[in-house]
Amino acid sequence: MDCLEVEKEALLKFKQGLIDPLGRLSSWVGEDCCKWRGVSCYNRTGCVIKLKLGNPFPNSLEGDGTVSELGGEINPSLLNLKYLNYLDLSMNNFEGMEIPKFIRSLGKLRYLNLSGASFDGLSSLKYLNLGGIDLSKAAAYWLQTVNTLHSLLDLVYLDLNSNNLQGGLPDAFQNFTSLQLLYLSKNSNIEGEFPRTLGNLCSLRTLILSVNKLSGEITEFLDGLSACSYSTLENLDLGFNKLTGNLPDSLGHLKNLRYLQLRSNAFHSPIPESIGSLSSIQELYLSQNQMGHPKQPWATLITGGARAQ
């Protein structure tokens, strides 16, 4: 089925606003926009669902090395692509233009790649919620992406749960020193050693890394957090991983901790007595590990009204 007339006109308006020195969009002529380069449509309806316009030659030596980059303006005519779910403008050059606000109104959009395209407007971003979006096609590159997000260091809230991400957690997270809430749960292919550098995030209030395949010990991580001049951590969920080793005494120094979930790992040795110092704790889950029960700490917790398992 040919593309819809209204969507073809939307794409032509979008093209008119672009600078295209190499003529990458020279195929954007004729009636059926579904046959244009970089455009994909749903076969049954002819609706445009994908625009893949990332620079295919980002490191080209031809000309001045930038000849294949798109630039110019992003026309809001894209809003007429009602079923657009994939938009890739990566590795082009929009010369510091602010990310168009209308992009947030693309209601069906599930994949957005603006990396390396010289957009402005990310430096003031505080909240980034990509939870539940399938990023499996980009999963192999997410580590490199996090390592290059220098413009997002003021993030306060980052939600990457249930994204089908894979690989290890990058040390670059330690640079997000303003981060208060970090959600990376239910990415079953996130694996490797638990990064001790997360212990440098002294502003963290909530850290959710459950239902992954993280391994190793968390001693250095907890030692780092407890060394903060004032630890704000209230919720820590590392349940359903493959974590091992002892729980250090420094765990008891997290005085604001209210919720602690360490269920279903491979922690061993006795539970540290310092847990009895967690005066704010309300819920504590340590079952399905290999730890013995201390005496006084459990009595302290139960007397204080905490729910423990």
Image (cartoon, rainbow, N blue to C red):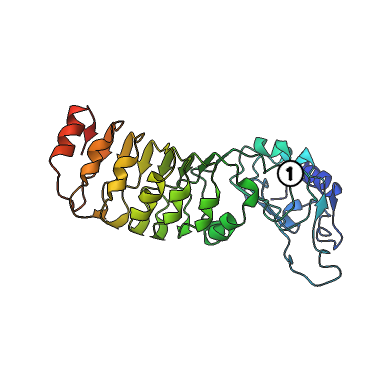
Residue farthest to the left? 295
Amino acid marked by disc 1: Leu
Please state, as top left, top right, bottom left or bottom right, where the C terminus lies in the image. top left
Left or right: where does residue 231 sit relative to residue 265? right
Residue lying farthest to the bottom in this orientation: 61
Q: Nearer the viewer, residue 7 or 243?
A: 243
Going by the image, does 67 lie left or right of 57?
Answer: right
Callout 1: helix, strand or loop?
loop
For the question of whether residue 203 can be seen, the reply is yes
- Residue at x 64% of width, y 42% of height: 83
Find residue 163 and report its horizontal and vertical position in percent: 48, 49
Q: Is residue 261 visible?
A: no
Front one among 162 and 266: 266
- Who is closer to the viewer here, 278 or 38? 278
- Residue at horizontal 41%, vertical 50%? 224
Most foreground residue, 78 or 198: 198
The image quarter in which residue 120 lies: top right
Question: At x 43% / y 43%, what residue is drawn?
Answer: 228
